[in-house]
Amino acid sequence: MRFSLPPLHSLRALIPALLLAAALLLSGNLAAQTPAVEFLGQKFEKKFEGGNPQNASRFVEFGLPPEPIKQWTKMVSYRHFPKSEPDTKKAATVLGQLVKQRDKDARLAIITNDKTQEAIIDFLIGQGETMEFNVFKYTKAPGGGLVATQYAIRFKLGEMDGGELKKIRTAAVNEMAKFDQSKAFAYFGLK
């Protein structure tokens, strides 16, 4: 029995498909290697990552396993701002100003820790019937810039009363204050 190779032009046509298949397999393996994030007793899995080439910032978003990222109700994200001034209080203050520009009635609070040089901002904003509670923790990044961890909840008016939201806010701010930022550093390869 004699074995013969397919014509060279047939192999060339297969190369893009093989490269695409390899890339898809590799990206699936990389996503599977990204550890889940736990916050307030819930596990969040990697859903999306991106960045801004203009300022070299990068981010990764983690959502609840059954939720598509565009329809999230709870989310955790890591954000790296390598070109930002490493001033955590200033970063939280600037974010607060941006929130107030978007929604002058937004409620926010900033907590700073001079010992750890970290800053936390939490705020509640609304757009129509949708409300969003956020808490961010800013930390100086190894090698310069800043890293932030975010926890957010999105809900419709009437789904949660003020007492429930107050409990969630207290728990989220307390957990964020204790959150180990080395997890975010590791994700971005910072040492």
Image (spheres, helix red, strand yellow):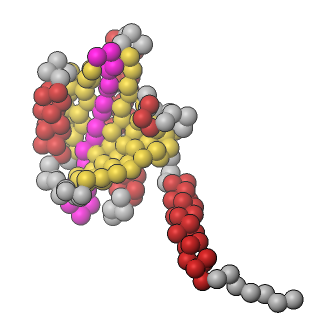
Give, as a single range, the part of the protein colored magenta: 128-145
* Of 8 and 75, the residue lying toward us: 8
* Of 62 and 120, the residue lying toward us: 62
Q: Residue at x 13, y 53 (%)?
A: 85
* Quadrant of image for the N terminus: bottom right
Whether residue 185 sits left or right of residue 72 in the image: it is: left
Question: Where residue 102 sits: x, y (%)?
Answer: 17, 27
* Of 37 and 31, the residue lying toward us: 31
* Quadrant of image for the C terminus: bottom left
Vertical order, 141 against 97 (above or below): below
Residue 134 in magenta stretch: yes
Vertical order, 99 against 187 (above or below): above
Question: Where residue 17 sits: x, y (%)?
Answer: 56, 66
Q: Residue at x 58, y 79 (%)?
A: 9
Is residue 28 in view? yes
Question: Where residue 48 sits: x, y (%)?
Answer: 42, 47
Dominant secondary structure of the magenta stretch? strand
Is residue 26 in view? no
Question: Where residue 145 sits: x, y (%)?
Answer: 20, 56
Q: Residue at x 39, y 58 (%)?
A: 186
Whether residue 111 sits left or right of residue 59 in the image: it is: left
